[in-house]
């Protein structure tokens, strides 16, 4: 049986002074965020301005709930710190969307 720790227990064990809340199921969080960080880093390109994700041409305005936008900001901040590259919340959202669409397409091909 897996042992589940409360946030306060984790804070005590790690000696953390603060934490950001992210609503990602625990079984996705570490590998998902590591994979996301590496995908963004490897796909960012810059021509002197703000880095953008290579190969993406279509620009659209997308609305987010305040809660989701704050979580995207939190993820972007964490990924920026761990990768040393400035990553925006929009780039995080784009990356998640790219991966989700690809996975859904693959799953659709398996059932067809």
Image: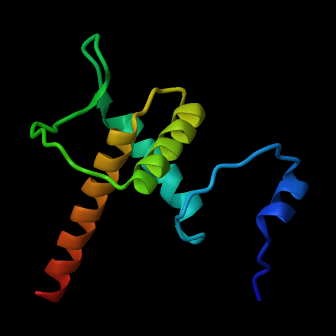
Q: Is residue 57 above or below residue 10?
A: above
Left or right placement of residue 106 versus residue 72 in this view: left
Considering depth in this image, is 98 or 35 the residue closer to the camera? 98
- Give the total number of marks visible in the rendering: 0
Direction front: furthest residue: 66
Please give the name of the residue rendered at 77% of the width and 77% of the height, measured from the top-left corner: 4
Percent from the top left, x then y, of residue 54?
Answer: 22, 34
Considering depth in this image, is 53 or 92 the residue closer to the camera? 92
Quadrant placement of the C terminus = bottom left
Please give the name of the residue rendered at 79% of the width and 70% of the height, measured from the top-left corner: 6
Considering depth in this image, is 23 or 82 the residue closer to the camera? 23
Direction top: furthest residue: 48
Quadrant placement of the N terminus = bottom right
Please give the name of the residue rendered at 62% of the width and 56% of the height, measured from the top-left corner: 21
Percent from the top left, x then y, of residue 31?
Answer: 54, 59
Please give the name of the residue rendered at 16% of the width and 39% of the height, measured from the top-left corner: 56
Q: How is the image coloured?
A: rainbow
Left or right placement of residue 61 versus residue 75 in this view: left
Quarter location, residue 78: top right
Percent from the top left, x then y, of residue 84?
Answer: 54, 27
Q: Is residue 96 above or below residue 80?
A: below
Percent from the top left, x then y, of residue 18?
Answer: 76, 45
């Amino acid at each position: 049986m897996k042992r589940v720790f409360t946030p306060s227990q984790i804070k005590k064990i790690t000696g953390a002074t603060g934490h950001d809340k992210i609503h990602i199921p625990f079984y996705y969080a570490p590998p998902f965020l590591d994979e996301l960080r590496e995908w963004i880093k490897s796909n960012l390109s810059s021509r002197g301005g703000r880095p953008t994700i290579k190969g993406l041409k279509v620009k659209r305005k997308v609305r987010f709930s305040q809660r989701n936008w704050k979580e995207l900001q939190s993820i972007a901040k964490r990924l920026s710190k761990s990768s040393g590259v400035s990553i925006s919340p929009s780039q995080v959202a784009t990356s998640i969307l790219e991966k989700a669409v690809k996975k859904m397409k693959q799953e659709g091909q398996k059932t067809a």
